[in-house]
Amino acid sequence: MTSTQIETSLSQLFEQWAGERPSLVLPLAPSASPRIYYRLSSAEKTAIGAYNTDRKENAAFLAFSKHFKSKGLPVPEIYAEDLEQNVYLQEDLGATTLYSYLLQAGDYFPDYLVQIYKKVAEKLALLQVHGGEGLDFGMCYPREAFDKQSMLWDFNTFKYYFLKLAKIPFEEQALEEGMHRFADYLLGADCSHFMFRDFQARNIMVKGGEPYFIDYQGGRRGAMQYDLASLLFQAKANIPPDIRQELLSHYIGVVSELMPVDEQKFTEYFYGYALIRCIQTFGTYGFRGLFERKEYFIKSIPFAIRNAKWILENTKFPVEMPELTKALTAIVASKKFEPFDKIKASSSLLTVTVQSFSYQQGIPQDASGHGGGFVFDCRSMHNPGRYEPYKKLTGRDEAVINFLQQHSNMEDFLNYVCLIVNPAIENYIERSFTSLSISFGCTGGQHRSVYAADRLAKHIHENYGLKVVLKHVEQERKGWKN
């Protein structure tokens, strides 16, 4: 389906449910999945619309949601569905995720955030124990349980997309044997409850101070420790070890009120599942970062390494897996994933000028006297300016930003731009150059080029701390009036 067809299908479904056409159909920022989300609203009602061509995944999500909601668990209500068109409507839980709280806190982990995490741990325990009762695990997709096969899939992704691509040496047969032994050990835990599978801060909404869970369509039967480890060892959450221990103890206390728990054995398996989650994370970062070259995932690798280092230094497992331990130790010791020295960059003489422009007015002249720099053409990107709702907006408006992220190749385009620009910036810093210009052009200098210039300027500032001069040639000429 095209974006217009998706919006039409969702609007028709909304009208059937609400009894009136939506006055707003706003594409939302994309997630890591291929699902496409919209916020739809009318005078009286609002909903989140989803489009997903994976019908088995849709069926799993809808079945789980209805089951969990019937038990009073914190998940969105399903309003309407049309699986022939691959669309459904669910409750709008707002725009605040637990991850947004982490971004606000930065490197500090304040007490209010600890209290939110405790609430999340409490609700997680309820979802795992009560949510698994009477659930049709036959709906799970792609597999009914997080069994040995599931673990080996994660191991193989780690092996081929991280170890191989990062050029970490290993003896394959010994590594395989250790992986099998580790998987067998982990399956000694109680694996009879619902396992969310991707329980992390981006999949936890906070509304009215209370947590709600989304994106559990990959859930299956498994060990409770896995989800808690996913939450507490989430790479970029950077939870301090003492707070992580406090949250683990709090969670075990909640679970013990729901079912019998051997705290010592539960804790031992918890760190085992923390390690396999870490391995899964390395595999994902390897595929999305080292293979697909997506910068966000490459930048996340050092955080995952920090988690692996802590686990290796503080945990001893009752199973022999020397080659796996050796490979993980080599990752921790590697310096190849360390970011560029930001202190060195910020103290350099380099000024980077980033600008957007309209090709109708021509490529702007370089005023530095150095003859110009990079010029990137955004006209191959899907243009939101073709559509009436976006014509008077710019690349700084939420609707346009979400359109470009959902319905164009802009993210891949900017990823390639960074792969070209980053080495140049680092080279210019090393050579004490003083000026670099980077320009983005599109037809009118209004949507695509504005968004691209803003994104790159933010990237350069965050990663290098350099002085960045940001100019929007066409929009400044027009006084931002469209």
Image (cartoon, rainbow, N blue to C red):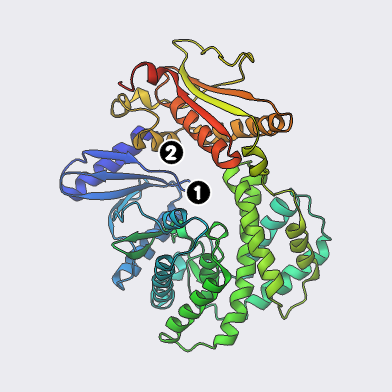
What percent of the width, then of the height, locates residue 231?
51, 66
In the picture, the disc for residue 32 is: 1
Is the C-beta separation of discs 1 and 2 under 8 Å?
no
For this orientation, the residue located farthest to the right is 171
Residue situated in front as seen by the camera: 320 or 81: 320
- Left or right of 87 in this view: 34: right
Query: How far is mark 1 from mark 2, CA to CA?
Result: 11 Å
Tell me the quarter of the image containing the C terminus. Answer: top left
Residue 153 seen in the current view: no
Residue situated in front as seen by the camera: 76 or 470: 470
Residue at the image position 23 percent from the left and 49 percent from the top: 46
Q: Residues within 10 Å of mark 2 (few under 14, many from 20)?
A: many
What percent of the width, then of the height, locates residue 461?
55, 38
Residue 235 seen in the current view: yes
Residue designated by label 2: 406
- Left or right of 257 in this view: 190: right
Q: Which quadrant would residue 326 be assigned to in this image?
A: bottom right
- Give above or below for 477 relative to 402: above
Tell me the quarter of the image containing the N terminus. Answer: top left
Element carrying mark 1: loop
Residue situated in front as seen by the camera: 12 or 33: 33
Q: Could you tell me the amino acid type at mark 1?
A: Ala
